[in-house]
Image: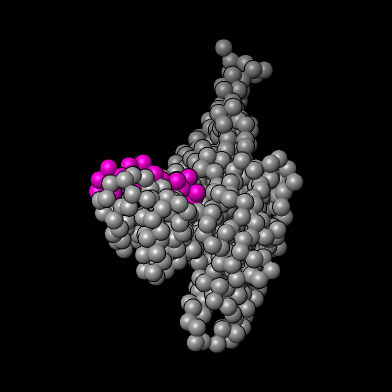
Amino acid sequence: MSSILTNTSAMVALQTLKQVNTNLGKTQSEISTGKTVASARDNSAVWAISKVMESDVKGFKGISESLSLGESTVAVARNASETVTELLTQIKGKVVSAQEENVDREKIQTDIVALRDQINSVVNAAQFNGLNLVKGTEDVNVLSSLDRSSDGTVSAANITVARQDLTGTAGSYGNGDTLAGNITSSAAAIDSTGASNDLQLTFAGTDADDLTLNVNGTTFTQAFDTDAATTVAALRDQINQAGLTGISASAAGGQLDLANTNSFDNFEVSWDTNGANTIAVTNNGNSDDDVGATGGAGSATLVYRAEEVELSTSAVVNEGDSYRISVNGTNYDYVAGKSETMEDVARGLKTAVDGGGETGVSTRVVQDDTSGAWKVLVDYDGSDADAGATMTLADAGQQGGTASGGLFGLDNIDVTSDAGAAAALENVETLIQNSIDSAAAFGSAEGRIETQSNFVSTLVDSLKSGIGTLVDANLEETSARLQALQVQQQLATQSLSIANQAPQNILSLFR
């Protein structure tokens, strides 16, 4: 049926043209914006995902800047640590030169002071944007990542860079809980005569066999008299006449006392009565001496003159733990920093005592072969006229102090005396090791930051690529579709024109 009121063909043609125009407009929008999903209307789910990823890209760009800043800051600290190591190595060379007695130690000391001042200058200047990683103990966090969980929660991740204090500050002794159980002195006084660490051998028996006594490789032979006191007196005379360095003997009835005035050297003593006679051993020295059982043959250790300050093998060292050695009434302190051990404490205490300038006092750090305990050996040679033959020795420990600097003791290096030159040689090795450890720690942190920075850069590229895959238009495909839609538009327009001519055909029925 034909009608001049309702043109169904024109309506169909018009709808087709509208659809073609809509598709053509969308295609032209993709070409102009380059995106297949330009707004939430195009595809709300994909658009939402792309926007979350775009926000992450923006965040990671900020992280990249943070990593660059952190890497530069750590690089400055590493360079400073390496420079300090080189300067300390030069100081070591000066200290070694000062070991000779026929050199001008005053001039050497002047050079050491100049190098020390340069180290202080380097440490103070080693800052980047006001942040100095070679002063203080507080860790520094460098923003390194944004971690998004499956539920959408976002959290920041950091790379922690530990400060490495390369100052020479002494710190401050704590006033917290006691740590007295972590540090123990072997005696209340250091006896320059060696009597407090003597080795006592008590002789008994009536057989006339010859006995042999070996002291530090020198053998003494003596007939065992029925009177033990006579035997002991004869041995005493032989030992004293032998001129063994630092070793002396005394007699009291049937007891022979051997004293060692060598600062840090132990000596082995062995004996054999070659018969039924016996020698009983009493040792007033350190409890870990190798003491033989009572009998006709045995051995023992004649210990060094120095007294021991032993540190715990089980205690954990925390920042601010303060330890003290008191010599002749003067306190010498070391306050531990982060991640330090009892070895660090021992070496710090040695440095403190060495820097005190006590006349006749020398120190050494050793580790016990059996227990593994670190010990500070403190010796006194009796040369202080005011102190006399002995100096008091005490110890203490408390929590809650302010840590000593990693170059603690640098300011006290003084090679103008024999004792100062000897002490400086071991102490400067500790300082060099501290600066090497600092440079290594900064180098490790710098490498990690650099690796993370490279990863973040690659991650940003991957995120951008993923966003492009979601929302970017395929222009080759879009171009081909545009051509097709333009043809469809022309055909739809022609079809609509033909459909609009249908009512004109009805007029022919009325001619």
Residue that sits furthest to the top in the current view: 1
Q: Where residue 66 appears, x then y in whole percent?
A: 62, 53
Quarter assignment of residue 315: top right
Horizontal arrangement in the rendering, residue 213 relative to residue 49 (left or right)? left
Residue 279 located within the stretch drawn in magenta: yes
Residue 15 located within the stretch drawn in magenta: no
Q: Where residue 241 appears, x then y in whole percent?
A: 39, 69
For the point 64% across and 66% down, which residue is it? Answer: 388
Residue that sits furthest to the right in the current view: 175
* 170, above or below 510, in the image: below
Q: Where residue 133 appears, x then y in whole percent?
A: 63, 59
Residue that sits furthest to the front in the current view: 226
Nearer to me, 137 or 30: 137
Report whether residue 272 is seen: no
For the point 25% across and 45% down, which residue is it? Answer: 275
Nearer to me, 312 or 88: 312
Report whether residue 151 is seen: yes
**Quarter of the image that includes the C terminus:** top right
Horizontal arrangement in the rendering, residue 498 relative to residue 211 (left or right)? right
Q: Which secondary structure class fits the magenta region best?
A: loop
For the point 58% across and 58% down, which residue is it? Answer: 190
Q: Where residue 16 appears, x then y in whole percent?
A: 55, 27
**Quarter of the image that includes the N terminus:** top right
Q: Which span of residues is magenta-colored?
A: 272-295
For the point 67% across and 65% down, which residue is it? Answer: 387
